[in-house]
Amino acid sequence: MGEVAAVERDVVVLQPHGELDVHTCSPLREEIEQHIKNGQTQLVVDLSDVTYLDSSALGVLVTGLKLARKSGGTLKLCGLQNNVRKIFDLTRLSKFFEIYDDPDSAAGSFQRS
């Protein structure tokens, strides 16, 4: 999956690596669910090191967004490579997620919201 890149100002930044698909996205799902269960509902997923994602990974992110919102927070994305951004645009999921260029911009947006 990757790792928790940072927890700063109550914002958790998760940074998965490589390909996120049906075989590799479970750790990300578990990480998101665990943070929300622990009351950390301001989440950023930094996809800058993700080279590919499939519908299973999209499902994990959408479910994470729904769970975070249900708990009074949200899940934001950042660092999308061009091929990953195209997937979000084609599926129109870019209309549902707040997408930022980098983790600092995404994390900083929580202070403004």
Image (cartoon, grey):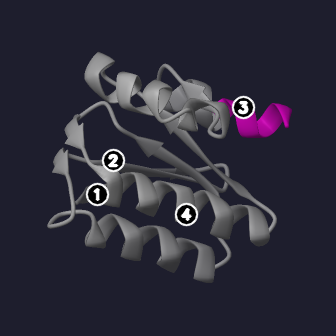
Looking at the image, residue 92 sits to the left or right of residue 6; the answer is right
Q: Nearer the viewer, residue 75 or 5?
A: 75
Q: Quadrant of the C terminus?
A: top right
Dot 2 crowding, Cα within 10 Å, few <14, some 14–19, many 20+:
many
CA distance for labels 2 and 3: 18 Å
- Name the amino acid, label 1: Glu
Q: Position of residue 77 (x, y in %)?
A: 51, 38
**Which of the two discs, 2 and 3, labels the residue nearer the N terminus?**
2
Q: Is residue 32 above or below residue 38?
A: above
Image marks 1 and 2: residues in contact by CB distance under 8 Å: yes
Which residue is pictured at 17% across the width and 63% down the height?
Answer: 24
Give the CA separation, mark 4 to mark 2.
14 Å
Which of the labelled discs sits on residue 3, or is there none?
1
Specify the segment rendered in magenta.
Answer: 108-113
Distance between the alpha carbons at the discs numbered 1 and 2: 6 Å
Q: Residue 7, position in %: x, y? A: 52, 54
The circle on residue 64 is: 4
Task: Tell me the kind of residue under disc 4.
Answer: Gly
Asked whether 71 falls inside the magenta stretch, the response is no
Q: Nearer the viewer, mark 1 or mark 4?
A: 4
For residue 15, the mark is: 2
Specify whether 67 is left or right of 63. Answer: right
- Dot 2 lies on which element? strand
Q: Residue at x 41, y 52 (%)?
A: 58
Quadrant position of the N terminus in the picture? bottom left
Q: Secondary structure at mark 4?
A: helix
Q: Quadrant of residue 106?
A: top right
Q: Amino acid at mark 3?
A: Ser
Sooner in the amino-acid sequence: mark 4 or mark 2 = 2
Q: Which residue is mark 3?
A: 109
Closest to the camera, between mark 4 and mark 2, is 4
Q: Earlier in the sequence, mark 1 or mark 2?
A: 1
